[in-house]
């Protein structure tokens, strides 16, 4: 074998030293290789090098690549292409075969081939550095090695405990000594906690402590490392407690103290509030207590033992037996609310039996009243209600009493219809009465619609809220109009009758007075309505009679007022005199009408409220002051009060028209008829008025009183107007007769008027002294007027007779 090798070496050397007889160019060699390849003489692949002067087989390329990998441990494909002189494409193709065919575990990562020996060397380097620093960040190592952190972690995990002596946690490598140190810190911190805590807060504190110990160069420890150590300690039983949602830690010592605190409080007080358990850190108090105390029962704000029911049951039973009342909250703990008391009362046997036996009742949520107490209080409240009814000023009729009004109205309508028909039969006959003759064309105000005609019935003198079709905006407005006692009035009366409510030190007496008043108010209102209904029925006849008399008086007075109003038109060109005449008529005739109407309406309202009122035989002579009229207007119900106020304001005003308008509105609201003065009725009234004035002038003996009567009679004779003039306007009224009388007659009138004015001036200036000279002058003027009286009477009466 050695000889053969030696022979081959000798032949190879001689072949090399021999000179070639034929020289080939590079081109010829390339063509020759191609031809041999085409003829399949060369039956294996050949790869061109980058220089193009050499051929290399894939096996040789792989061999050279493996040599380079074994030498460097980590080499990029680009570097292999440069080293082998082969195009990168062929290197990449062969790299896949090299990696897949190598049993040692080569890997192709991001264009690099890395051997396991390379990672072993890297692991040894990392371990040396780790032992120096105690902890290393994988991100820093990965950046230095130019690989991904996850890939680096996967490589190191296989070598932990062998080549790398440490622990990988949360992207950090730690030495066993460091892990032991931090584990001790976590164990100590967890054992030092005695109340529930969020572990993230604890880890933050430990991180600050480690940074202070390691200095500024130390690497921050991740919370996940602490959590991992904590979970391991808890699993091994080195720390005791319960972990909820991964971060909420409740130490066992706290849970034990918590249960002991709850047991102690509940056993001593027989109850415990949910707020107390919330403060102790128990988030679901009801479930917690029900699981521990099966005999207890949950309330709204607390959990109670059955002994609470027994205690309250005995107190309620005693209160019912004594015909008294009890506030269950006064027996229960102060932390209990009214809803808690209501729930406990529902479990009391004495309360349930009292409710079934009609011996007691629960008002509000916590107040228990015996029926004896309620009946006694109701009896005393009925007496207070009687005082309220008699003192009430509202004239509204309760809704239950409207049918009584309609009955009275029907009877009054039939009587009045017969009276009007009887009067119309007398048409054309003369009579001394001013308002007995009603012409066929008489007008009655208002007379615009059937609705207004229905209002014109005397017995329908009620508020606008009792009109057909009228509706109230709210129940409270109805009660105000019906003069029904309010809740406040009832509560105040109850407090006066039962001072115990205030004496027992209730912080807010309304809490007991409100439910009690709400319970009693419907019964009191029903009793009030029944009494009003009875009294209204009893007073129905008096009311009809009152309305009949009022209608008759109002008919006569209103017609006379219209008659006197027409005379004011003669002085419209003289504003000052016109104002004096308007005020005079308002202060005299208008005031009398308003006083009569207000007085009768007030009596009517009192009768409807059940107040016994004696009818005044002469209501026309009643005189009211402005304050009295205002008080009466306020006492009228609803819109009638507002319209009555307008009458009061018109009486204090300056125009008769305003009074007439407001009077019509009040009459319409009250359902009274107002007759309008027509031509025929005006002539009849003027004739009667002239006749009365003529008789008065003939019989008059007072020279001063004669003048205004004579002037009024002259105005009827000259202008056919009924003038009502005060002394201040007589002179102007006399001057306006100058063109209507002959000179001699006017001279008599002016002389009499001048003498009258002089006499009145002397009388006002007289001191009453006998030695005063004015007395002689007064006597002289009286004598002069006495001498002129026959001439003035002859002037007036002669004109009348002519």
Image: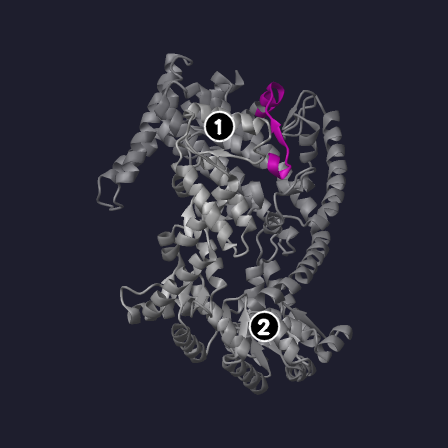
Kindly tell me whether residue 490 is visible in this rendering.
yes
Q: Position of residue 747 (x, y in %)?
A: 35, 18
Which stretch did the figure color magenta?
A: 668-685
Label at residue 299:
none
Q: Give the Cα distance between marks 1 and 2.
A: 80 Å
Local packing at callout 2 (Cα closer than 10 Å; few below 14, some 14-19, many 20+) is many
Tell me if residue 383 comes above or below residue 505 in the rendering: above
Question: Which quadrant holds residue 499?
Answer: bottom right
Local packing at callout 1 (Cα closer than 10 Å; few below 14, some 14-19, many 20+) is few
**363 is within the stretch colored magenta:** no
- Is 192 on the left or on the right of 522, as rendered? left
Q: Of 596 and 774, which appears nearest the observer?
A: 596
Secondary structure under badge 2? helix
Question: Which quadrant holds residue 679?
Answer: top right
Q: Of 381 and 339, which appears nearest the observer?
A: 339
- Is 47 on the left or on the right of 736, as rendered? right
Q: Position of residue 126 (x, y in %)?
A: 38, 63
- Is 332 on the left or on the right of 358, as rendered? left
The residue that label 2 is drawn on is 285
Tell me if residue 354 comes above or below residue 788 in the rendering: below
Q: Earlier in the sequence, mark 1 or mark 2?
A: 2
The residue that label 1 is drawn on is 657
Which residue: 73% across, 52% down?
537
Kindly tell me whether residue 722 is visible in this rendering.
no
């Amino acid at each position: 074998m050695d000889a053969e090798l030696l022979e081959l070496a000798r032949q190879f050397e001689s072949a090399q030293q021999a000179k070639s007889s034929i020289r080939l160019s590079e081109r010829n060699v390339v063509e020759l290789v191609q031809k041999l390849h085409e003829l399949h003489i060369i039956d294996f692949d050949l790869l061109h090098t980058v220089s193009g002067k050499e051929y290399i087989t894939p096996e040789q390329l792989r061999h050279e690549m493996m040599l380079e990998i074994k030498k460097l441990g980590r080499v990029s494909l680009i570097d292999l292409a440069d080293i082998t002189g082969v195009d990168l494409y062929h290197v990449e193709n062969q790299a896949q075969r090299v990696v897949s065919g190598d049993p040692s575990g080569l890997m192709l990562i991001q264009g690099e081939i890395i051997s396991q020996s390379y990672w072993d060397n890297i692991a040894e380097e990392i371990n040396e550095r780790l032992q120096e620093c105690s902890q290393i960040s994988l991100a820093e190592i990965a950046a230095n090695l130019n690989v991904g952190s996850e890939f680096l972690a996967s490589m190191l995990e296989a070598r932990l405990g062998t080549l790398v002596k440490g622990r990988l946690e949360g992207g950090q490598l730690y030495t066993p000594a460091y892990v032991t140190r931090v584990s001790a810190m976590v164990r100590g911190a967890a054992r030092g906690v005695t109340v529930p805590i969020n572990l993230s807060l604890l880890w933050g504190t430990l991180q600050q402590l480690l940074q202070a110990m390691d200095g500024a160069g130390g690497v921050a420890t991740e919370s996940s490392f602490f959590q991992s150590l904590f979970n391991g300690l808890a699993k091994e039983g080195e720390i005791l407690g319960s972990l909820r949602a991964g971060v909420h830690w409740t130490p066992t010592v706290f849970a034990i103290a918590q249960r002991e605190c709850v047991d102690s409080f509940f056993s001593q007080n027989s109850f415990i509030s949910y707020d107390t358990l919330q403060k102790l850190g128990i988030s679901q108090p009801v479930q917690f207590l029900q699981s521990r105390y099966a005999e207890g029962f949950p309330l709204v704000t607390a959990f109670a033992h059955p002994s609470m029911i027994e205690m309250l049951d005995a107190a309620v039973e005693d209160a019912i037996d004594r015909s008294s009342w009890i506030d269950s909250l006064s027996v229960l703990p102060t932390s209990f609310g009214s809803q808690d008391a209501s729930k406990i009362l529902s479990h009391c046997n004495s309360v349930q039996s009292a409710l079934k036996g009609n011996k007691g009742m629960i008002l509000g949520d916590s107040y228990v009243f015996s029926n004896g107490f309620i009946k006694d209080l109701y009896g005393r409240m009925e007496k207070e209600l009687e005082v309220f009814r008699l003192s009430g000023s509202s004239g509204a009729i309760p809704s239950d009493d409207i049918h009584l009004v309609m009955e009275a109205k029907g009877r009054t309508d039939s009587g009045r219809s017969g009276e009007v028909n009887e009067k119309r039969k007398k048409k054309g006959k003369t009579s001394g009465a001013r308002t007995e003759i009603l012409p066929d064309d008489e007008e009655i105000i208002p007379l615009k619609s059937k609705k207004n005609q229905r209002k014109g019935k005397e017995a329908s003198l009620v508020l606008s809220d009792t009109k057909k079709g009228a509706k109230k905006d709210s129940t409270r407005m109805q009660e105000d109009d019906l003069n029904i006692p309010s809740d406040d009035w009832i509560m105040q009366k109850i407090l006066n009758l039962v001072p115990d409510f205030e004496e027992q030190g209730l912080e807010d007496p309304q809490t007991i007075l409100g439910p009690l008043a709400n319970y009693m108010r419907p019964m009191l209102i029903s009793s009030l309505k029944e009494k009003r209904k009875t009294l209204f029925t009893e007073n129905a006849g008096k009311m009809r009679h009152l309305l009949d008399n009022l209608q008759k008086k109002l008919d006569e007075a209103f017609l006379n007022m219209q008659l006197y109003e027409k005379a004011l038109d003669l002085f419209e060109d003289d504003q000052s005199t016109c104002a004096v005449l308007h005020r005079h008529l308002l202060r005299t005739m208008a005031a009398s009408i308003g006083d009569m109407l207000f007085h009768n309406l007030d009596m009517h309202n009192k009768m409807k409220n059940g107040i016994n009122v004696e009818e005044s035989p002469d209501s026309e002579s009643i005189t009211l002051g402005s304050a009295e009229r205002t008080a009466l207007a306020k006492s009228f119900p609803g819109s009638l009060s507002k319209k009555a106020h307008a009458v009061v304001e018109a009486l204090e005003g300056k125009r008769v028209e305003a009074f007439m308008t407001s009077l019509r509105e009040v009459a319409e609201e009250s359902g009274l008829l107002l007759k309008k003065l027509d031509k025929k009725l005006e002539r009849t009234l003027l004739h009667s008025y002239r006749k009365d004035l003529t008789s008065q002038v003939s019989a008059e003996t007072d020279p001063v009183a004669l003048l205004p009567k004579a002037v009024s009679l002259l105005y009827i004779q000259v202008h056919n107007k009924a003038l009502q003039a005060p002394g201040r306007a007589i002179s102007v009224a006399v001057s306006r007769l100058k063109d209507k009388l002959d000179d001699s007659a006017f001279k008599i009138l002016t002389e009499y008027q001048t003498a009258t004015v002089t006499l009145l001036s002397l009388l006002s200036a007289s001191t009453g002294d006998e030695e005063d000279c004015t007395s002689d002058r007064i006597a002289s003027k009286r004598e002069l007027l006495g001498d002129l009286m026959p001439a003035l009477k002859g002037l007036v009466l002669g004109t009348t007779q002519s």
